[in-house]
Image (cartoon, grey):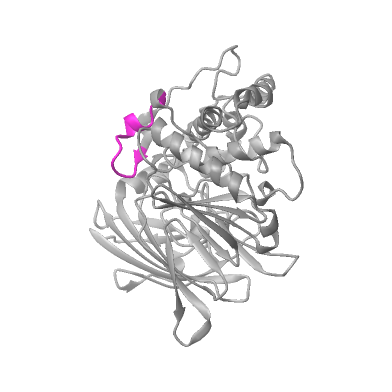
Amino acid sequence: MHPGNNLTRDEARRRAALIQTPLYDISLDLTRDSDSFTCEATIHFLCQEPGAESFIDFLAPSVDSCELNGAEVAKEAFNGARIKLGNLRDANELHVLGTCAYQNVGAGLCRFTDPVDHKIYLHSQFETFDAHRMFPCFDQPDLKASFTFTVLAPNDWIVVSNNPGQAQQVAGKENIKRWTFGATPKMSSYLTAIVAGPYHGVRDRHGDVDLGLFCRQSLAQYLDPDEIFTVTKQGLDFYGQAYKYPYPFQKYDQLFVPEFSAGAMENIGCVTFNESMVFRSKVTEAVREDRANAILHEMAHMWFGDLVTMRWWDDLWLNESFATFMSVLAQVEATRFKNGWVTFANQYKAGARRQDQLPTTHPIAADVPDIESVYLNLPACCGSWSPTSDRTPFSVACSATSNSVSMPTPRSRTFSPTSKPDPVETSRPGQSSGSRPRA
């Protein structure tokens, strides 16, 4: 890990008070046959204190060029993880051209070669602090922004992002297509996503929401879209009524990706899952119940976590635990899996109580002074969660030492909405809300 690749809460607060309304235009060239790709980014943002200095996060092998308001930024301003920005104006334009590295550690833009047919697949994973491995950004949850992506990719690839995309052949290059994705609603950087490769896809529609399922071509014969789409549609109906707010984004794609570092991740409109949930042999009803729970957990985040988002990672416990609560509630109320609370009590609440008796137990809502501290607290807010689990138990966020499950009181003042909803009303559990961790 780069020694400078850590963001403190104090740095984030200072930057959030300084930087306003960032807009990102990101172009990625994924056509290289190498371990790297090119990123070109133009970022517009306002500064509350003209003349001040700040920084933008960018963890990359090299910055090939960087200009701030038309003036070249000195090479020394880039330390491998950040670019220092000095003498900011009221309104600023930053242009960065850099070479980024593909990852195989489950963070950033990950690259996988299928051992069956040798096809290459990419997927991104950014929570908590890894979007800046793919493009320069103010990589903290409360600096929400609109993102526009343009991607150059091989002709036989599909590229999926948060918004619907359109592909056009690049003039003079028969083997390359340009994928363009319109500006997203305001969202946190860790919720952006790019998934690319010769994925097998199946499409459906529910009301006015386009649905998609994707997996590697070599797994296409095992994908069971009927069951997954059924749970998805039941979940969309349930949450729209429970939150009293319809699904807030343009589409809902679910992608089963290889070498995924977690169980699933709630990227807006582009949810990624560990491909172990594509069953290659007959499985038990309990395993299918577990997958349904993962689908509903990530969907719960579309409202609670994505539309309305924590300001800082000390509220990750609430984000995750509430989504788990909502996913079990949705299972029992809206799907065929009626024993969700039995599974919850036996598998997760009991495990949480065991952890609470260990000398390593600590408060659920812990102090998180920097990014490196986030996962020190994750077992407390997620019970027996591990990087390979597919859901995060709500149990510890319930009263782990009592005999009854009690809802935690959300600190709703610390959540920042993207637009319409009142942050206080949206995050109150009176209507049932959501939480999440899969990454």
Q: Is residue 361 left or right of residue 405?
A: right
- On the image, the x and y values in percent for residue 301 come to 47, 40
> Which percent across, then down, holds residue 320?
52, 35
Above/below status of 306 relative to 219: above
Frontmost residue, 53 versus 129: 129
Q: Is residue 252 visible?
A: yes
Q: Which residue occupies the foreground of this view, 136 or 411?
A: 411
- Residue 46 against residue 312 in the figure, above or below: below
Give how far across and how far down residue 313 sits, in percent: 48, 39
- Residue 83 located within the stretch drawn in magenta: no
For this view, does 436 lie left or right of residue 97? Answer: right
Q: Quadrant of residue 105?
A: bottom right
Residue at the spot 65% in from the left edge and 61% down from the top edge: 216
Based on the picture, tell me whether residue 418 belongs to the magenta stretch: yes
Q: Taking 423 as reference, is 401 left or right? A: right
Q: Is residue 109 visible?
A: no
User: Residue 307 vs residue 300: left or right?
Assistant: left
Q: Position of residue 228 (x, y in %)?
A: 58, 45
Q: Residue at x 59, y 47 (%)?
A: 226
The residue stretch that appears in magenta: 416-429
Query: Which quadrant is the N terminus positioned in?
Result: bottom right
Residue farthest toward the top in the current orientation of the protein: 403
Q: Residue at x 22, y 58 (%)?
A: 90
At a point 53% along the width and 30% down the height, the residue shown is 321
Q: Residue furthest bottom?
A: 172
**Taking 203 as reference, is 35 above or below it?**
below
Q: How many marks?
A: 0
Please say if 243 is above or below 113.
above
Q: Quadrant of the C terminus?
A: top right
Which residue occupies the foreground of this view, 391 or 109?
A: 391
